Image: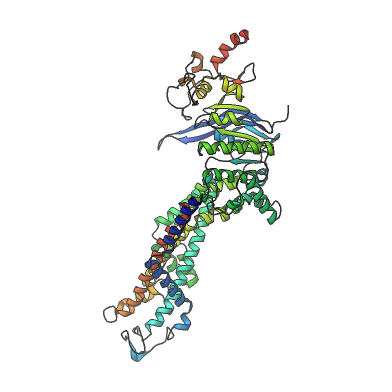
Amino acid sequence: MTENILELHGISRTYSTRQGLFGRKVPVHAVDEVSLSLQPGQTLALVGESGSGKSTTGRIALGLELPNSGHVLFRGAELPPAHTSAWRRMRTHMQMIYQDPLAVLDRRLSILDQVREPLDIHDIGSASERNNKALAMLDAVGLNANYASSLPHQLSGGQRQRAVLARALIMQPALLVCDEPVSALDVSIQAQVVNLLMDLQKDLRLSLLFISHDLKVVRQVSQRIAVMYLGRIVEYGETNLLLSNPTHPYTKALVSAVPVAGRRTRERIILKGEPPNPADRPTGCAFHPRCPVVRPECVSVSPTFSTLPDGRSVACHAVDAAQPTKEVGI
Amino acid sequence: MIMMEKVSETAAGTRKNTNRRIPFLVIASVLWIVFVVGVALLADQIAPYQYTALDLPNRLASPFHPQHLLGTDELGRDILSRLIVSVRISVLVALGATLISACFGTTMGFAAAHFRGRIEQFILMLADFQAAMPFLILSLSVLAFFGNALPLFIGLMGFYGWERYARISRGLAISASAQGYAGAVRQLGASPTRVYLRHILPNISSTLIVSMTLTFPEIILMESSLSFLGLGVQPPLTSLGNMVGYGREYMTRAPWIMFAPAVLIVTTTLAISLLGDWLRDRLDKGLQ
């Protein structure tokens, strides 16, 4: 087994919010005891609904935010503290692309200036080399030289996302965190950007941490999936296994919610109850108020990870109980 | 494809046409401001008399006097010459003070946005203090204690309105850093200097410039009020407010002493406000 490029060990991140004007401070566990690993050249997808802590996990993986506990290893070494010069130098190895490409581009600078900016920041190459490199990178993401002098608002959504991608990849990072990179784009353009991302991954041997709520996209890009619910990972394993045969009741509901063209072939699981509120976390298993197969112990005891025969990890009491009979059956 | 190009061409064409048509009032304002600044720069060359020169036989001469176009004051000093020199002093004070205020306020705002925490709270507290304290009283007490040399006076006026720049720049810098371009550039590894000077400052400059066009006339008025109260620019130096202040004693007998500088104050502040209003609409076009 090759060495992991990124490892998260038991990271937690808590924010404190005040409820009401004079309310006391309530801690919100955005991310709770999350452990993940990513191998070079592979894609790990983080899925879950809004507020499940996906983006915070991504930001912690990049060192943009510090976890309250746990640690992040990049190529086996801890990340330097954020916004120090050592951290700034690390940026050449790890980059990020975002959901809204217009917001993260400077409205007043041309696309070429913005794509070559990382080279200016890190002082790589001479001025003319930088321009040539930026033009080559724009070409690699499918933007020809005509767009180089355009301003961001003159481009379409897909073109902007390509420009953001070019800016992130021009320093040839090893790790790219994609925070909902296609959810703001049209479906037809989504496919283009996803294909481009996968081609570039092959060419540059990128490792991707792909944050999304769209299982169709995730199925296409990722080798492994981690499903998050209220800041915790509930199921973690190979994409094909996990999507074809989900075991955790939450994953089952997510998978059954993916619309399929043509005949409807299976029953949809519609979750009952309130969407989760991270500030008011249910006791025991956080999913139990909405769980269709809830058991008495779910209310009080938080489930631990158990490994299934096919290598997946699941945190669910119902799966634990079903496990022995299933193994006997095999 | 060709049709598409045509459509976009005509669209661009009409847009350019509408952009090119500048309202008459704005043109008039720009011309007036250019004229006022020109007068301020060339004051020594174009003033017909020394602004302190007395012409005792022609005291309180009315306008259109053969030797004095705008008349004379109670000591027979030429109003036109005094007006020209006053414009120079008032523009100098207002321009210097506006620049000081904008630079200081923006720096404080950026510092608050960058350091957050206690430094931010301290700066915001200062800004609140500045906003709550009537500036006239503040400047009265400072001028009463320290006397008023012109550089001190400009420096004091430079504190006028800095809290607005600080609040604007802090708010915009924080929102740009949280999920906008500034956060993305910082994530690329840019130093804070680069983030603030190359990215945030150009992006918020339109807002700051508009804010400056609001502060500029206010400072002219503030200078006039202080000079009117006798605490601003001191004789023998003269400024627009100073002329109004000393002219009020002769308001019934020689209203032109007061009238000329008053008209100049009104027109200049109006012109700058009109220009600022138009600039605000134009400079934000990148947002559309």
- Image position, residue B105 (x, y; %): 49, 58
- Asked whether residue A291 appears in the rendered view, the answer is yes
Task: Please tell me which residue lies in front, A209 or A255.
Answer: A255
Q: How many marks?
A: 0
Task: Please tell me which residue lies in front, B277 or A268.
Answer: A268
The colouring scheme, among rainbow, by chain, secondary structure or one colour, is rainbow
From the viewer's perspective, is residue B141 above or below residue A188? below
User: Left of A144 or right of it: where is A77?
Assistant: right
Q: In which quarter of the image is the C terminus of chain A?
A: top right
In which quadrant of the rendered view does residue A196 lie?
top right
From the viewer's perspective, is residue B133 above or below residue A90? below
In which quadrant of the rendered view does residue B78 lie?
bottom left
The residue furthest front is B2
- Image position, residue B10 (x, y; %): 45, 56
Q: In which quarter of the image is the N terminus of chain A?
A: top right
User: Left of A202 or right of it: where is B81?
Assistant: left
- Image position, residue A198 (x, y; %): 63, 35
- Asked whether residue B223 appears in the rendered view, the answer is no
From the viewer's perspective, is residue B105 above or below residue B148? above
Q: Residue at x 30, y 85 (%)?
A: B62
The residue furthest bottom is B57
- Image position, residue B135 (x, y; %): 40, 61
Task: Please tell me which residue lies in front, A321 or A210.
Answer: A210
